[in-house]
Protein backbone atom coordinates (compact mmCIF):
# COMPACT_ATOMS: atom_id res chain seq x y z
CA UNK A 1 0.00 0.00 0.00
CA UNK A 2 1.22 3.48 -0.81
CA UNK A 3 1.86 5.91 2.00
CA UNK A 4 -0.33 8.98 2.40
CA UNK A 5 2.57 11.13 1.22
CA UNK A 6 2.94 9.19 -2.03
CA UNK A 7 -0.81 9.30 -2.63
CA UNK A 8 -0.83 13.04 -1.95
CA UNK A 9 1.99 13.73 -4.39
CA UNK A 10 0.23 11.58 -6.98
CA UNK A 11 -2.84 13.81 -6.71
CA UNK A 12 -0.69 16.93 -7.02
CA UNK A 13 1.03 15.59 -10.15
CA UNK A 14 -2.28 14.72 -11.79
CA UNK A 15 -3.62 18.19 -10.94
CA UNK A 16 -0.57 19.76 -12.58
CA UNK A 17 -1.03 17.56 -15.66
CA UNK A 18 -4.68 18.61 -15.99
CA UNK A 19 -3.74 22.28 -15.54
CA UNK A 20 -1.01 21.95 -18.19
CA UNK A 21 -3.49 20.35 -20.56
CA UNK A 22 -5.79 23.35 -20.20
CA UNK A 23 -3.10 26.06 -20.28
CA UNK A 24 -1.19 24.62 -23.22
CA UNK A 25 -4.39 24.07 -25.21
CA UNK A 26 -3.74 20.37 -25.64
CA UNK A 27 -6.59 18.06 -26.55
CA UNK A 28 -9.22 17.95 -23.82
CA UNK A 29 -9.37 14.18 -24.21
CA UNK A 30 -6.04 14.00 -22.38
CA UNK A 31 -8.03 14.69 -19.21
CA UNK A 32 -9.57 11.24 -19.68
CA UNK A 33 -6.07 9.77 -19.80
CA UNK A 34 -5.19 11.51 -16.54
CA UNK A 35 -8.42 10.19 -14.99
CA UNK A 36 -7.53 6.63 -16.03
CA UNK A 37 -4.07 7.05 -14.52
CA UNK A 38 -5.65 8.16 -11.24
CA UNK A 39 -7.92 5.09 -11.26
CA UNK A 40 -4.94 2.79 -11.85
CA UNK A 41 -2.98 4.60 -9.13
CA UNK A 42 -5.89 4.15 -6.73
CA UNK A 43 -6.36 0.46 -7.52
CA UNK A 44 -2.64 -0.13 -7.01
CA UNK A 45 -2.97 1.22 -3.47
CA UNK A 46 -5.30 -1.67 -2.58
CA UNK A 47 -2.62 -4.29 -3.26
Image (tube, rainbow, N blue to C red):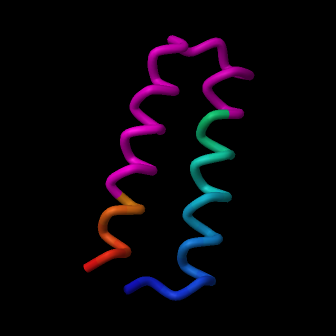
Residue placed furthest toward the front = 46
- Which quadrant is home to the C terminus? bottom left
The mark total stands at 0
Q: Nearer the viewer, residue 10 or 1?
A: 1
- Which quadrant is home to the N terminus? bottom left
The span shown in magenta is 19-40
**Residue at the spot x=62%, y=83% of the render?**
5
Q: Is residue 32 left or right of residue 5?
A: left
From what the image shows, is residue 44 above or below residue 6? above
Q: Is residue 39 left or right of residue 27?
A: left
From what the image shows, is residue 41 above or below residue 6? above
**Residue at the spot x=67%, y=20% of the render?**
24
Q: Nearer the viewer, residue 47 or 25?
A: 47
Q: Is residue 45 left or right of residue 31?
A: left
Q: Quadrant location of residue 44?
A: bottom left
| Residue 36 forms part of the magenta stretch | yes
Residue 37 position, x and y percent, is: 39, 47
Residue 33 position, x and y percent, is: 39, 32
Q: Is residue 43 left or right of residue 27?
A: left
| Residue 22 forms part of the magenta stretch | yes
Q: Main secondary structure of the magenta part?
A: helix
**Residue at the spot x=74%, y=22% of the render?**
23
From what the image shows, is residue 21 above or below residue 16? above
Residue 26 position, x and y percent, is: 56, 15
Q: Quadrant location of residue 42?
A: bottom left
From what the image shows, is residue 31 above or below residue 15? above
Amino acid sequence: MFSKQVMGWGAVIVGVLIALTEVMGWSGSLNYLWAVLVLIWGFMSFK
